[in-house]
Image: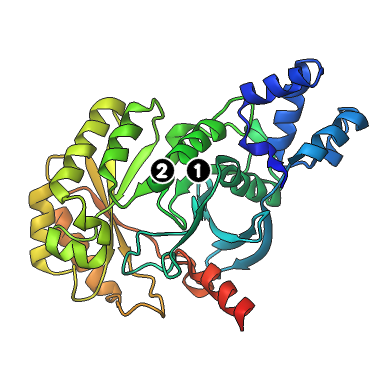
């Protein structure tokens, strides 16, 4: 199988170009073209001989959009195909400041959180850094974007299928690639990484020199209840997660965010709000409440709009920084893993 050209850093590409006897400035031309979403055949500023030579060894763009669903609220969900026939999802969200793309880091997921469709078939494999980057590049080109000030994708959230820190090495290299100034150059300040709480890797990320926004899926302030919702809680206690968040803030200066999916009768009572306030008040953090996007294969149910705002009021009255996320993409299988799951079902019927 051909290698993925987007897996190469700028320095790695420069080294390869030198090895095949080409002038060093070609690396910049090729790197920029790759990050624009061009195939080798479209790189008309390099010779046909070099294009053919590169094409024999590499795939320029191994991630393709094969399906797009657009919600009534403007949210768009993509199904991306990979070179081995697997598929992953991405969600494009339009805000007043521009487009945010939610990307996947794994095919499937082994975390198996009770509210999520991504883990229904387990973990198939990790994505490479170039495949994660390929999602961004494919969406940017789909929107007619280019590089620098003509780029359409403004923000990235690593919150699609998979646990980013379970694919740590490739995720870290992706973060370095996507923020590389020679390429698509999305600021690390505009990138959020969501984890279910892999504590050792949270420390690694803090020490990595990559300063993205850290988001942690909490979903209950009680360890025993959290274990029912998130199996990873059997390995790491909430107190350990909070210690890792403190370390991350000390190393990066970035406040951290807790995601909290509201599940009717499970984690949305006054008792839960009081414990969240007790745990988090005074910390440099924010709580992002999310109304459950129900998955038919799961049994959990979401509450009403009134329930959600009641819980939000309890937190803010108690002194926490908290907001309720706007519900997006509900009419297009917007929750993680739903579109991929439908695709798998259709292909096996």
**Disc 1 element:** strand
Q: In the visual, does 136 lie left or right of 223? A: right
**Disc 2 element:** strand
Q: Is residue 95 above or below residue 26?
A: below
* Pick the front one: 284 or 21: 21
Label 1 CA crowd tier, 10 Å (few <14, some 14–19, many 20+)? many
Q: Is residue 41 above or below residue 251?
A: below
Q: In the visual, does 116 lie left or right of 58? A: left
Residue farthest to the bottom, as pictured: 349
Residue farthest to the right, as pictured: 48
Q: Which mark is residue 259?
A: none
Q: Which mark is residue 155?
A: 1
Label 2 CA crowd tier, 10 Å (few <14, some 14–19, many 20+)? many
* Pick the front one: 288 or 166: 166
Percent across and percent down for residue 146 are: 70, 38
Nearer the observer: mark 1 or 2; the answer is: 2
Q: Quadrant of residue 255?
A: top left
* Pick the front one: 28 or 3: 3
Residue at left 71%, top 47%?
Answer: 1
Residue at left 32%, top 62%?
Answer: 290
Residue at left 47%, top 40%?
Answer: 171
Q: Quadrant of residue 283?
A: top left
Percent across and percent down for residue 9 are: 60, 28
Q: Is residue 107 visible?
A: no
Residue at left 49%, top 53%?
Answer: 106
Percent across and percent down for residue 227 are: 20, 63
Percent across and percent down for residue 258 are: 27, 50
Which badge, 1 or 2, comes first in the chain's sequence?
A: 1
For marks 1 and 2, give the CA distance: 8 Å
Residue linked to disc 2? 192
Asked if the residue under mark 2 is in contact with the one under mark 1, i.e. CB atoms within 8 Å, the reply is yes
């Amino acid at each position: 199988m051909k290698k993925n050209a987007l897996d190469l850093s700028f320095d790695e590409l420069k080294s390869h170009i030198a090895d095949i006897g080409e002038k060093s400035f070609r690396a910049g031309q090729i790197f920029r073209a790759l990050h624009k979403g061009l195939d080798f055949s479209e790189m008309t500023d390099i010779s046909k001989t070099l294009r053919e030579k590169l094409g024999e060894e590499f795939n320029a763009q191994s991630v393709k959009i094969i399906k797009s669903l657009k919600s009534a609220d403007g949210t768009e969900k993509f199904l991306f195909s990979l070179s081995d026939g697997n598929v992953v999802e991405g969600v494009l969200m339009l805000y007043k400041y521009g487009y945010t793309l939610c990307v996947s880091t794994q095919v499937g997921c082994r975390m198996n959180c009770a509210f999520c469709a991504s883990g229904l078939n387990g973990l198939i494999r990790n994505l490479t850094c170039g495949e994660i980057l390929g999602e961004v590049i494919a969406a940017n080109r789909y929107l007619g974007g280019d590089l620098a000030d003509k780029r359409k994708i403004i923000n990235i959230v690593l919150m699609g299928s998979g646990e980013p820190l379970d694919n740590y090495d490739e995720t870290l290299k992706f973060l370095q690639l996507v923020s590389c100034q020679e390429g698509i150059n999305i600021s690390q300040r505009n990138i959020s990484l969501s984890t279910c709480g892999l504590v050792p890797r949270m420390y690694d990320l803090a020490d990595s020199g990559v300063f993205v926004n850290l988001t942690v899926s909490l979903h209950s302030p009680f360890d025993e209840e959290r274990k029912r919702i998130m199996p990873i809680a059997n390995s790491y206690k909430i107190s350990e997660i909070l210690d890792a968040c403190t370390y991350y803030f000390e190393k990066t200066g970035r406040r951290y965010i807790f995601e909290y999916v509201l599940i009717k009768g499970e984690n949305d009572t006054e008792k839960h709000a009081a414990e969240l306030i007790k745990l988090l008040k005074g910390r440099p953090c924010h709580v992002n409440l999310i109304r459950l996007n129900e998955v038919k294969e799961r049994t959990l149910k979401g509450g009403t709009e009134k329930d959600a705002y009641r819980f939000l009021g309890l937190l803010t009255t108690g002194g926490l920084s908290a907001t309720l996320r706007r519900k997006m993409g509900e009419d297009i299988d917007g929750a993680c893993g739903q579109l991929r799951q439908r695709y798998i079902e259709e292909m096996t019927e």
